[in-house]
């Protein structure tokens, strides 16, 4: 696999489309950081890191509206990819849906949302867009 973050996003996207409650994904530190951000911003219900095997897994409980069963995650797109990296300075960070969505940014101070990076005035690699 050449792009583990794209695989992570695709597994979540497929689980949401199939209306699964839980999805299991092989773990890495970057994926753990992205999962933490999705939880803090309310896109997933909960998560659990399991340290079994050489790599470990991430179990993510997906979030749906209680009455309409609409998923909390409408779109999950990869921005930067191995063949074409996308970097943004602090002044040119992308806004997703005019601020209603989030962009996940990998900075020198760790993985954070576009809003947090704007406040800290740092740029980095734009990993993905979520709304």
Image (cartoon, rainbow, N blue to C red):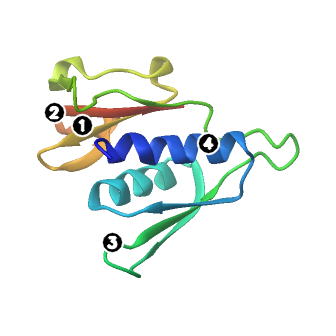
Name the residue: 88% across, 45% down: 67
Report how far apart the C-alphas of labels 4 and 2 lie in the structure.
34 Å
Task: Choose top left, top right, bottom left or bottom right for residue 86.
Answer: top left
Measured in 3D between alpha carbons, the distance from the residue under mark 1 to the one under mark 3, in whole angstroms, is 29 Å
Q: Which mark is residue 108?
A: none
Q: Give me the residue at 41% from left, 57% from top.
A: 36
Residue 14: numbered disc: 4
* Local SS, label 2: loop
Residue under label 3: 55
In this picture, is 23 found above or below 67?
A: below
Towards the viewer: 77 or 92:
77
**Residue to which mark 2 is pinned:** 121
In space, the residues marked 4 and 3 are separated at their CA atoms by 22 Å
* Disc 4 to disc 1, C-alpha distance: 29 Å
Per the image, label 4 sits on a secondary structure element best described as helix
Compared with 53, 113 (above or below) is: above
Number of other residues with Cα within 10 Å of mark 2, as a class: few under 14, some 14 to 19, many 20 or more: few
Marks 4, 1: nearer the viewer: 4
What is the number of the mark on residue 117? 1
Real-space CA distance between mark 2 and mark 1, rounded to the nearest whole angstrom: 6 Å
Q: Residue at x 62, y 42 (%)?
A: 14
Image depth: mark 1 or mark 3 in front: 3
Q: Is residue 105 left or right of residue 122?
A: right
Q: Nearer the viewer, mark 4 or mark 2?
A: 4
Can you name the residue that lies furthest to the left here?
108
Count the numbered circles shown.
Answer: 4
Are the residues flagged by discs 4 and 1 in contact, CB closer than 8 Å?
Answer: no
Residue 40 at x, y percent in the picture:
47, 54
């Amino acid at each position: 696999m050449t792009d583990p973050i794209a695989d992570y996003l695709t597994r979540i996207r497929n689980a949401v489309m199939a209306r699964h409650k839980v999805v299991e994904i092989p773990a890495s530190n970057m994926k753990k950081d992205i999962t933490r951000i999705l939880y803090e911003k309310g896109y997933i219900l909960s998560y659990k890191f399991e340290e079994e095997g050489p790599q470990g897994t991430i179990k993510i409980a997906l979030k749906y509206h209680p009455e309409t069963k609409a998923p909390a995650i409408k779109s999950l797109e990869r921005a930067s990819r191995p063949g074409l990296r996308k970097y943004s300075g602090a002044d040119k960070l992308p806004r997703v849906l005019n601020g209603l969505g989030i962009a996940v940014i990998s900075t020198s101070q760790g993985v954070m949302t576009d809003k947090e990076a704007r406040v800290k005035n740092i740029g980095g690699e734009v990993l993905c867009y979520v709304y």
